[in-house]
Structures are given as structure tokens and as C-alpha cells.
Image (spheres, grey):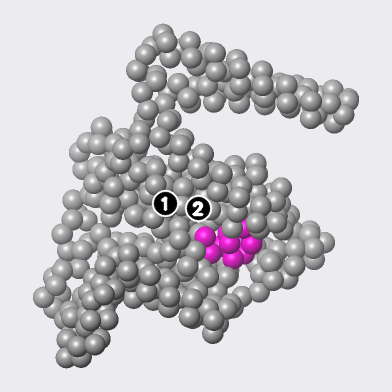
Amino acid sequence: MQLLIEGIFNGISIGAVLLIAALGLAIVFGLMGVINLAHGELMMLGAYTTFVVQNGFRQIGGPLLETYIFFALIAAFFVAALAGLVLERGVIRYLYGRPLETLLATWGVSLILQQFVRSVSWQLVIGLVIFCALFFGALWAISKRSNFYRIRNWAIAILAVLGAKISWEIAAALGRRFGLALTQPWFGAQNVDVTAPSWLRGGVVLMGFQLPYVRLFIIALTLICVVGIYLFLGRSPWGLRIRAVTQNRSMSACLGIPTAKVDALTFALGSGLAGIAGCAISLLGSVGPNTGQNYIVDAFMVVVVGGVGKLVGTLVAALAIGTINYLVGSGTLALISTPIQPLVDFFTFFATTSMAKVMVFALIIAFLQVRPAGIFPQKGRMVDA
């Protein structure tokens, strides 16, 4: 019995990680109908933000270092939300109603973000800042011309080429002048480690086994996020607008709801939650450019099994998948089934991380044959279209 309780707790803690990873995806995918394959990379940005905040507080030192995780959570939310807002305004808003194209576009963005964290340096940042200043400044100046819309496409093409060439030459010259101080990558391709505050180390001993403080913290953080999202969507004016646009976009626009702002806010909110998820997973292991890839598939499975756009379904699916995954992969079910030898052989065969995922995939496929819309089906923009 003790073994089973320990396995269920560890499974729930894994489910909590999955839930917080899937929460933002459920909002974006469920409410907006956007297949965001860059969601994992937004989590990665949150994890790297936590690493940066930790190093900043480490420079300060003292008792304030023990509180860095709370500042990191806030910073991770806003960094990921800002990245999501830029993504929505720059790419996604042109692709609403075309889910397959959003899939391809966000996949390309995810590759760009992975390479960006590998290569980002002061030289690259200076080049990007100069390019943005030249491109958008010149575009703003040209927009004052009376014939702007007639020459707009040509102006953008010429400004993009000229801006890229000038910013590249200036950044290269600065790199040659100052050397590694500007050209050395901030993070590189190697993984970096985030150290949990001392009050999150160790755990509570209960019934002969230890409940790690870190996993208890992640479970509490997940509960706060779920309650916060529930209250925001159910009680706040902007939550009401989001649900209205989800149900009927045309009617909402006729009633004066700014649908474009609702889209941007929804995507930024989902992205910000991905940043919080990234902060949480940084406490469980190393952070690298591929960190988000380890969770994006499981997060999509949680959303699909729970029911698109249904928070309760996401909660149930995350806990169920996390618990089953751990009980099978850790061999707990094989040990519990000791009196029945065929069951022992069966669960022992699947008692590895990869084989446990295979079993979970098979169970999900079987489940979707019975309930293709998930545990709690939800009407959304895609369904109404």
C-alpha cells in the first residue's frame, strides 16, 4: 500500500508539471484554434529567464537570493507573454482559420527560437536593435507620404535589405573591435542549471516516504494557476469577452468587442502560462535549447484527451496521464501485481520511461476511439466554423 501511495504522489506531481505546461496550450489551442508548436520554446524562454534572474540575485547575494524564484515566476510570465504577443501580432493574426498553416508557421518559429538561444550574444542583440530602429523608423517616415499604400510592398522589401546590410556591417565591426566581450554566446548549446532556493530542498516525511518540497511547490503553483485562470475566464470582463469571441466571433464584433485585442490578449496569456511552466520545470532538471520539446507532445496529449478548451478536462487528463505514466514506467504496477505472474511479466515489459510512453499512447488511442472529442467535449471556434 505504501508503495502505491508513493507512486500515486509522484504521478500526481508529474501530472502537475504536465498540467501547468498544458494550461496555456489549452487556452491557445482550445479557445483560439491555433496549433502552436512554439509553445515548448515559450516554456524554454521561461526557463532561461529563471536562470538569468537567479544569476542576477546571486550577484546581489544575501537573504534576497532565497526569494529569487518569486521574481523569476513574474519575469518568466512577462517575457513569454511578450514573446507570444509579438508572435501573434507578427505571424498568427494573418493565419486565423487556417490551423495547418499555423502549425507550419509556429514550427518554424520554434526552430528560430531554439537557434536564437544557442547563438544570442551582445553582437546579435546590437545588430537586431539597429535593424529594428532603421527598418521601423524609415517605415514610419515613409508612411507619412500620400502614396504610401501604393509603394508599401516595395518600401518594405528595400528597407529590409538595406536595414539588414547596415546592421550586419555595424555589428560585425563592433565584434572585431571588442572581440569575445561582444561575440561570446550568452548560453550556448550546453545545458545550464537552475538551483532551487534552500527552503525548497529536502522534503516532508510522510508514512515512511519523502514528499520533495520542490514537487509540493509545483503542485501548489499549479493549483494557483488553475484557480487564477478559472476566475479570470469566468469572472473578469476580459474573460467574458474571450468566451464571447470563442463562441461567436462575428456577433461579438457586431456588439463592439475588440476581437483583435481579445486575440492578442488570449495568445499572450497562454504564452505567459508557458513561461510559468518553464520556470517550474527548471527546478526539476537542466535547461537547454531542447527543454520545451520534452513536454510539448505530452502537453498536446493532455489537451486532446481532456477535451479542447475545457480546463476541467485538462486537469483530469494531466493528472491521469502523469500518474499512469509514472506507475507503469517506475515498475510500481509490476511490484504490486506480484501474486499474479502474467501481470508481473506484462508490466515489467513496459517498466521503462520509453515503453511507458508507448503504453500511454496506446491507451490514449483506444480512449479516443470511444470519445473522439475527449473527456469533456467543448464547442470552440474551430467547431463553429
Is residue 242 on the magenta stretch? no
Badges 1 and 2: C-beta atoms under 8 Å apart? yes
Which residue range is magenta in the image? 25-34
Is 99 situated above or below 380?
above
Is 6 situated above or below 246?
below
Residue lying farthest bottom?
339
Q: Residue at x 20, y 68 (%)?
A: 211
| Helix, strand or loop under label 2 | helix
Q: CA distance from mark 1 to mark 2?
A: 8 Å
Q: Residue at x 42, y 51 (%)?
A: 292
Q: Quadrant of residue 19?
A: bottom left
Task: Name the side, left or right, on which 259 lies relative to 118.
Answer: right
- Residue 3 percent location from the top left of the image: 17, 79
Is residue 315 visible in the rendered image? The answer is no
Is 313 situated above or below 50?
below
Residue count near mark 2 (Cα–Cα under 10 Å), binned few <14, some 14–19, many ≥20? many
Task: Name the side, left or right, on which 64 lies relative to 29.
Answer: left
Question: Residue under circle 1?
Answer: 292
- Residue 34 percent location from the top left of the image: 62, 58
- Residue 270 percent location from the top left of the image: 53, 56
Residue lying farthest left?
208
Label drawn at residue 39: 2
Q: Nearer the viewer, residue 287 or 310?
A: 287
